[in-house]
């Protein structure tokens, strides 16, 4: 599996010339999903990182549209698009990582004896059942 490229919060703010306050305002409004805020241990303590491609595309969209549309309206548009996607989120003591189900090729469990079980279809069935309940 290819490691997702991450960008630190500091570099992100510098790259786009945005303030800490703006970033967290966009988070509160749902423009930047909570699961994109990845906490990691660093020499200086805990730092926040983001999936670089996703967050950069989102910030560029926000910056290009924020003068033409209210942030609340933009958030509705974006959240409507994201609701079309299904995600699986893995949460560990080191942080969280989310994957679009449409991009997942396989989900596996490995037992103590080294035996591997593929559970991809089981997880997809759970998603299908969830969709049926939400109709």
Image (spheres, rainbow, N blue to C red):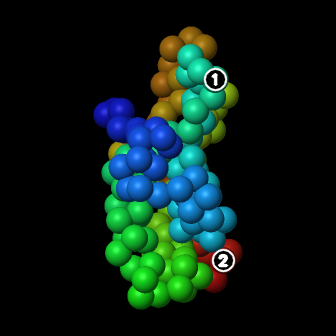
Q: Residue at x 41, y 88 (%)?
A: 68
SS for tag 1? strand
Q: What is the number of the mark on residue 73?
A: none
Ranked by sequence position, the earlier of labels 1 and 2 is 1
Q: Is residue 68 above or below residue 32?
A: below
Location of residue 31 (image quadrant): bottom right
SS for tag 2? loop
Would residue 107 appear left or right of 25 to someone viewing this image? left
> Can the viewer see residue 3?
yes
> Can the viewer see residue 107?
no
Location of residue 105 (image quadrant): top left
x, y (%) of residue 11? 41, 41
x, y (%) of residue 89? 57, 47
x, y (%) of residue 65? 39, 79
**Mark 2 Cα shell of 10 Å, populated few (<14), some (14-19), many (≥20):** few
Q: Which numbered disc, 1 or 2, marks the residue closer to the eye?
A: 1
Q: What is the number of the mark on residue 45?
A: 1
Would residue 57 appear left or right of 37 to someone viewing this image? left
Q: Is residue 69 above or below residue 47?
A: below
x, y (%) of residue 108? 48, 34
Q: Residue at x 43, y 83 (%)?
A: 67
The residue tagged 2 is: 134
Q: Residue at x 62, y 65 (%)?
A: 25
């Amino acid at each position: 599996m290819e490691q997702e490229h991450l960008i630190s919060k500091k570099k992100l703010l510098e790259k786009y010339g945005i303030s800490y306050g703006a970033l967290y305002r966009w988070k509160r409004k749902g423009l930047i999903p909570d699961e994109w805020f990845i906490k990691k241990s660093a020499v200086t303590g805990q730092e926040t990182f983001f999936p670089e491609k996703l967050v950069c595309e989102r910030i560029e969209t926000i910056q290009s549209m924020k003068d033409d549309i209210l942030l609340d309206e933009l958030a509705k548009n974006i959240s409507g698009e994201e609701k079309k996607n299904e995600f699986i989120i893995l949460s560990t003591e080191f942080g969280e990582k989310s994957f679009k189900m449409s991009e997942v090729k396989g989900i596996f469990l490995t037992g103590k004896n080294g035996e591997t079980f593929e559970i991809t279809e089981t997880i997809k069935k759970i998603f299908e059942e969830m969709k049926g309940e939400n109709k």
